[in-house]
Amino acid sequence: MADDAAAQGDGGGLVFHPLDQFEIKALFGGDAIHWYTPTNVTMWMALAVLCVIGLLVLGTSKRSIVPGRTQSVAELAYGFVYKMVEDVTGKDGIRYFPYIFTLFLFILFSNFLGLLPLSFTTTSHIAVTAVLAMAVFLTVTILGFVKNGASFLSLFWVSSAPLALRPILAVIEIISYFVRPVSHSIRLAGNMMAGHAVIKVFAGFAQVLAIAPIAIIAVAAIYGLEVLVSFIQAYVFTILTCVYLKDALHPHH
Amino acid sequence: MEGNIAQLGQFIGAGLAAIGSGAAAIGVGHVAGNFLAGALRNPSAAGSQTATLFIGIAFAEALGIFSFLVALLLMFAV
Amino acid sequence: MADSAVEQGAEAGGAGMPQLDFSTFPNQIFWLLVTLIVIYFVLSRVALPRIAGILAERKGTITNDIAAAEELKLKAQEAEQAYDKALADARAEAQRIVAEAKAEIQTELDAEIARADARIAEKTAESEAAIAEIRASAMDSVQAVAKDTAKEIVAALGGKADARSVTSAVTAAMKGDA
């Protein structure tokens, strides 16, 4: 296949393989990918873990009152997510702060690591984001029923609406509730996939000499946009988790 | 020209689905523009509403991402 | 171009989207769960308590420092008040001393003036007495001279004048003059 691509490139045609970068390969050779096989997924997730440890554990190891650069960033991330949880969910949401912070850091570092050239973006895979979103969905639903009992169902019964509209609204609310994990996961994976695929497509245009400068400038510009998107998607995923958690803790509008 | 009618349909469908990305762009611009208009009228309330802004942008963008995904599926998966 | 696109589409269609390759899902999900659990434990056991500790410690330090600064400020204010009080005391003392000195000088001055006045009055009285004496003696001599002269003139004119009438005439004339 690579030979074919090279031959076609020589032939003057444009060849795009924008999705090749998302392929999952076993790290130590072999074609079979079992559930335990160390793959590039494993490697980049491990790197994300190392980044988290480097920032939050090694960076704060000095415990200085006047923080250095790494410690400042760690405290900034902590304060950012802590304030988000407190503002959106309320005081009783603070208990779930470590859980939300875990999600935030994992997504943030996966997104940023995916922006390194030749890297692999774990969060661009539906399987990964679907697990993250389903974890949030199940946690929130179970928590809602445990905390509120059957009155959690009042989330779907909009008491401020006219009585005649309420059944229709209830149907809409239930549908939107069950679409949440889908949109939650596909938003993240789609954003990541789209950005990387677009960069790859523009890189493919760079094969043609006439438009190569424009293509390279476009790659640089989109790269900048992707840095922003990487952060915003991590932020959005986290804040939506907080919003869903708030619904579970306080279902009465 | 070789190829078959199904492939033609795939490519046309993918192109049509990609229009949805542009529509999502309009939506995101609308959200951000209205937020800016409101924020300039009452700047003191703007800071507390940035979270709502991002949630709104995320919802608008998610639908665009769906159409982009449909295009990708048509191109590569069907 | 069209050929290559079609061919590529066929190739890619064969490969499909890596995201939809379900055979890799168990692998990804397994490693994702491992990653999340590791991050969760690292955060909840090490990182979050430590950062919370650092933040609390910093807050405590800042509060302590602010309290210390507050205390120092109070002390400074006290010192300033004491200084102001001392200054006011010293100023009042100085004014008192000045007033005392002024009063003393005033009394001395008054006494001196009174003494000088007395001396002047004494001198004036003395001088007046002397002047009166001199004037009286001058009057007497003038009277004597006038009597003598009158007697002589009367005698020279050939008249005979007794002493008594001459004296009364002279006295009357002098009174009329005066």
Image: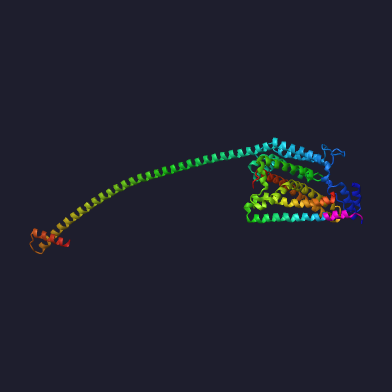
Furthest residue to the front?
Answer: A164
Please tell me in which quadrant of the rendered image residue B4 appears. bottom right
Magenta-colored span: B2-13
Above or below residue C13? Residue C75 is above
- Colouring: rainbow
Residue A117 in percent (x, y) is at 81, 46
Q: How many marks?
A: 0
Please tell me in which quadrant of the rendered image residue A61 appears. top right
Q: In the shown orientation, is residue B4 left or right of residue B31?
A: right
Q: In the shown orientation, is residue A136 left or right of residue C161?
A: right
Identify the residue shown where x is 60% and y is 40%. Answer: C62
Residue C14 in percent (x, y) is at 88, 47
Residue C75 in percent (x, y) is at 52, 39
Furthest residue to the bottom?
Answer: C157
- Report the predominant secondary structure element of the magenta stretch: helix
Looking at the image, which is closer to me, C140 or A85? A85
Looking at the image, which is closer to me, C96 or A163? A163
- Confirm whether residue C1 shows in the render: no
Looking at the image, which is closer to me, C59 or C171? C59
Residue B77 in percent (x, y) is at 84, 49
Q: In the shown orientation, is residue A42 left or right of residue B32?
A: right
Above or below residue A133? Residue B21 is below
Magenta segment includes B12: yes
- Confirm whether residue C171 shows in the render: yes
Furthest residue to the top?
Answer: C45
Identify the residue shown where x is 78% and y is 48%. Answer: A190
Magenta segment includes A124: no
